[in-house]
Amino acid sequence: MKTAANSAEKMREHLLELREVSFSYVMRGGEKLQVFDKLSLSVSYAEFLGIAGPSGCGKSTLLRIMAGLLKPESGEVLFRGKPLKEPTPRISMMFQSPALFPWYTVLENVMLALIHEKELSREEKEERVKVFLDMVGLMGFETAYPAELSGGMRQRVALARALVAQPDLLLMDEPFSNLDPLTAISLRREIETLWRNQSLPPSSVVMVSHDIEELVELSDRIIVLTKRPVKIAGIIEIEMERPRSRRSKEFYEYVDEVYTLLS
Ligand SMILES: Nc1ncnc2c1ncn2[C@@H]1O[C@H](COP(=O)(O)OP(=O)(O)OP(=O)(O)O)[C@@H](O)[C@H]1O
Ligand SMILES: [Mg+2]
């Protein structure tokens, strides 16, 4: 749970809900690949939800459905109680490798996320972008181009871009898997700190990861998925104080629990 100020009431409300969602890809030959068959799950307000599952089961597809980028064949996706029909700036996504435009500077890359904010002037947008660049530790790099940055710094630009429109929900698809271990540690901490700070976006986070320890470190709940067609193998609630130490016996009991559900 986030902080004591967070009422239990609020935690029970759903920010995003999937109700009996079915989804298939249509392959080139015309045959269907069924990924989801009536899958239901929800993301609560202020929750950090982790998602684990076998390779190729449909985790990235699930995030794209949550983002409104893919439409379910049947079933419903509700965002703040209303059907999610298309992508919205209230939900943002961060990928394994940051998709930055090489010909734009750091500042311009982040500013792109404010394209829908018609009421803000260019100066106001720049101010906002600078606040978020500062937040992710990139102050002073506004005029740099992506090629001039390290992998970790590029992922920080992607984080600033995902947060600058102040979304309620941040979806992350293996966001740390391309980073060196030390950079991954510091970026994980920063994201956890931002998320725990109620006055800053995002309210809730959904993170897909193959790194079970990373999931146990950050998640309030971990949903473990099965192979296709995907079912929920189990849901584990992690009740450990934050920031969590990976050294405790309790920590490894949770890790084992996830592995048992995966196997
Ligand atoms: N655009 C697409 N068209 C057709 N099939 C697809 C498409 N994208 C993914 N698939 C297939 O759908 C299934 C689920 O893919 P998805 O990328 O969601 O899995 P994943 O759990 O994220 O995998 P990984 O753990 O390797 O990242 C896979 O069998 C994949 O081959
Ligand atoms: Mg994937």
Image (cartoon, grey):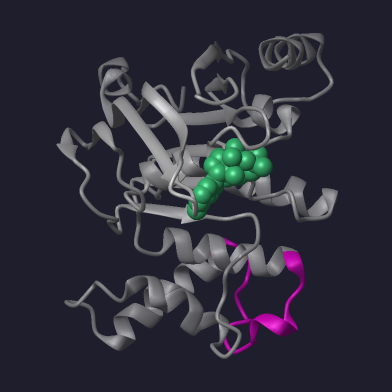
Quarter, ligand 1: top right
Residue at screen point 29% across, 29% down: 17
Residue at screen point 69% across, 26% down: 244
Residue at screen point 74% across, 28% down: 213
Using the image, determine if residue 175 lies above or below residue 130. Answer: above
Question: In screen coordinates, is 101 left or right of 21?
Answer: right
Where does the image place residue 233, in percent across and percent down from the top left? Answer: 56, 13
**Which is more toward the observer, 31 or 143?**
31
Where does the image place residue 160, in percent across and percent down from the top left? Answer: 51, 64
Question: In screen coordinates, is 185 left or right of 78?
Answer: right
Using the image, determine if residue 251 lies above or below residue 100. Answer: above
> How many labels were placed on the picture?
0
Query: Which stretch did the figure color magenta?
Result: 135-151
Using the image, determine if residue 158 lies above or below residue 16. Answer: below
Using the image, determine if residue 237 lies above or below residue 10. Answer: above
Where does the image place residue 172, in percent across and percent down from the top left? Answer: 54, 47
What is the quadrant of residue 59 in the picture?
Answer: top right
- Judged by its main secondary structure, the magenta piece is loop
Residue at screen point 24% across, 72% down: 117
**Which is more toward the observer, 229 or 18?**
229
Residue at the outermost front position: 29
Task: Inspect this view and state whether residue 194 appears.
Answer: no
**Which is more toward the observer, 21 or 159?**
21
Question: In screen coordinates, is 81 left or right of 99?
Answer: left
Task: Inspect this view and state whether residue 161 appears.
Answer: yes
Where does the image place residue 152, in percent across and percent down from the top left? Answer: 73, 63
Q: Is residue 131 magenta?
A: no
